């Protein structure tokens, strides 16, 4: 699968088999492709190198703690950008492909390709089981998913497809001893809004948290807004089962301070979702997944599904408090949701089954990148 320099795809090599398998499938759809080693750099810069390196460094998930490490990381990012740009200037017919491509050196690789005039494809896990994202513009809030509802008017909803997907959702296995996925919700909990917390240092929070700024900030805003919930209602929070960063003490501090919140790290996430009156999130995958269970969803951050009719957006602390005060009236447009979710499952995300990836979808994504 070496291909020729004039066409094909070139991807930044990944250590995970499922990512490399996806890239090889994209190469098969395009006709050729090969990987680029992650450590190759060039120190012959361009006029944009400094600005691009600063942009990428600001987006890095792990910020250097002292001057020396920051200088080294910045130097590597500059070298990665220069190498990528120099390569794609010589091979502009190739498509640059990268996993996520939002932060750090991956971002530098994609920006080098973009500044060289090459086409791009950004890959990522999809929030639906058995699917992956492949988008020419980016992933999550930076992708190409239309934000105007009229774009979905011609979509014919497929309830059977959506029901089959809903039946495949499973709670994420926990990597923490204090976060589990056990059993059913305790009885007599009363009405509540479910808040599935996200990984604090995930790119979704670093880049797209918007006015709440961080996972800690989100908890603090929830605590203040909870005072406006109807009588007998509460917020039910669960920490992310994969997060190495614990928010427990911030949540417990808020509860001890009078916030109308409950921390339930034990009960299965989807059991809590099903029993809730609505879901509140910054921009998590569970916000989208909640739509498959006909739950109203409130977002506070930048999310590709924060579209009126699908969800309700809280753009400020005042708006969040107002929505909590009217929690019983939270709603959505079921017909629009059906069309939107059908479009995601049948046209946007790339499906994988026991026979491999849907090659027609992959070819369509490649064609979009080259358009």
Image: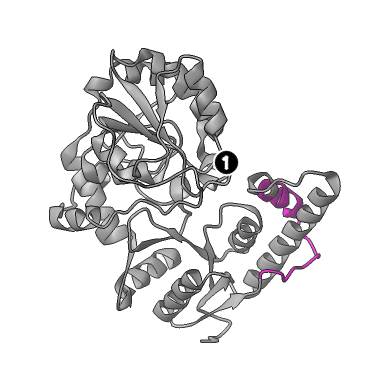
Hey, which quadrant is residue 298 in on the image?
Answer: top left
Q: Residue at x 39, y 56 (%)?
A: 126
> Is residue 52 in the magenta section?
yes
Q: Secondary structure at mark 1?
A: helix
In this picture, which residue range is highlighted in magenta? 38-56
Task: Tell me if residue 20 is in the magenta stretch.
Answer: no
Image coords of residue 217 (percent x, y): 54, 28
Query: For mark 1, what is the residue?
Result: 206
Q: Residues within 10 Å of mark 1 (few under 14, many from 20)?
A: some
Place of residue 344 in the rendered image (x, y in percent of width and height, measured from the top left): 29, 54
Figure label count: 1
Q: Is residue 134 above or below residue 195?
A: below
User: How are the residues colored?
Assistant: one colour
Q: Is residue 77 above or below residue 326?
A: below
Percent across and percent down for residue 324 are 34, 19
Tell me if residue 305 comes above or below residue 299 in the rendering.
below
Q: Confirm whether residue 211 shows in the render.
A: no
């Amino acid at each position: 699968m070496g291909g020729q320099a004039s066409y094909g795809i070139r991807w930044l090599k990944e250590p995970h088999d499922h990512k490399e398998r996806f890239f090889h499938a994209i190469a098969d759809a395009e006709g050729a492709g090969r990987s680029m080693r992650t450590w190759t750099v060039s120190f012959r810069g361009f006029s944009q190198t400094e600005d691009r390196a600063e942009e990428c460094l600001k987006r890095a998930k792990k910020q250097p703690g002292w001057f020396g490490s920051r200088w080294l990381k910045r130097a590597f990012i500059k070298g990665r950008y220069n190498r990528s740009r120099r390569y794609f200037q010589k091979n502009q017919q190739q498509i640059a492909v990268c996993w996520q491509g939002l932060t750090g050196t991956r971002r530098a690789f994609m920006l080098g390709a973009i500044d060289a005039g090459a086409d791009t494809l950004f890959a990522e896990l999809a929030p639906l089981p058995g699917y992956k994202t492949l988008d020419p513009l980016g992933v999550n809030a930076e992708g190409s998913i239309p934000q105007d509802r009229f774009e979905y008017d011609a979509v014919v909803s497929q309830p059977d497809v959506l029901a089959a997907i809903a039946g495949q959702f499973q709670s994420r296995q926990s990597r923490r001893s204090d976060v589990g996925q056990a059993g059913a919700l305790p009885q007599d909990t009363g009405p509540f809004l479910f808040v599935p917390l996200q990984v604090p240092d995930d790119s979704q929070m670093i880049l797209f948290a918007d006015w709440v700024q961080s996972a800690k900030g989100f908890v603090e805003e929830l605590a203040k807004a909870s005072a406006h919930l109807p009588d007998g209602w509460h917020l039910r929070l669960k920490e992310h089962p994969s997060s190495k960063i614990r928010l427990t003490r911030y949540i417990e501090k808020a509860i001890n301070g009078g916030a109308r919140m409950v921390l339930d790290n034990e009960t299965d996430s989807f059991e809590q979702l099903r029993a809730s009156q609505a879901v509140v999130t910054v921009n998590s995958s569970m916000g989208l997944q909640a739509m498959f269970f006909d739950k109203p969803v409130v977002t506070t951050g930048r999310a590709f599904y924060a579209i009126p009719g699908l969800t309700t957006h809280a753009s400020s602390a005042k708006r969040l408090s107002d929505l909590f005060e009217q929690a019983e009236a939270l709603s959505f447009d079921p017909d629009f949701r059906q069309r939107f979710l059908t479009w995601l499952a049948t046209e946007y995300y790339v499906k994988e089954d026991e026979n491999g990836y849907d090659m027609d979808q992959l070819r369509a994504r490649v064609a979009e990148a080259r358009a």
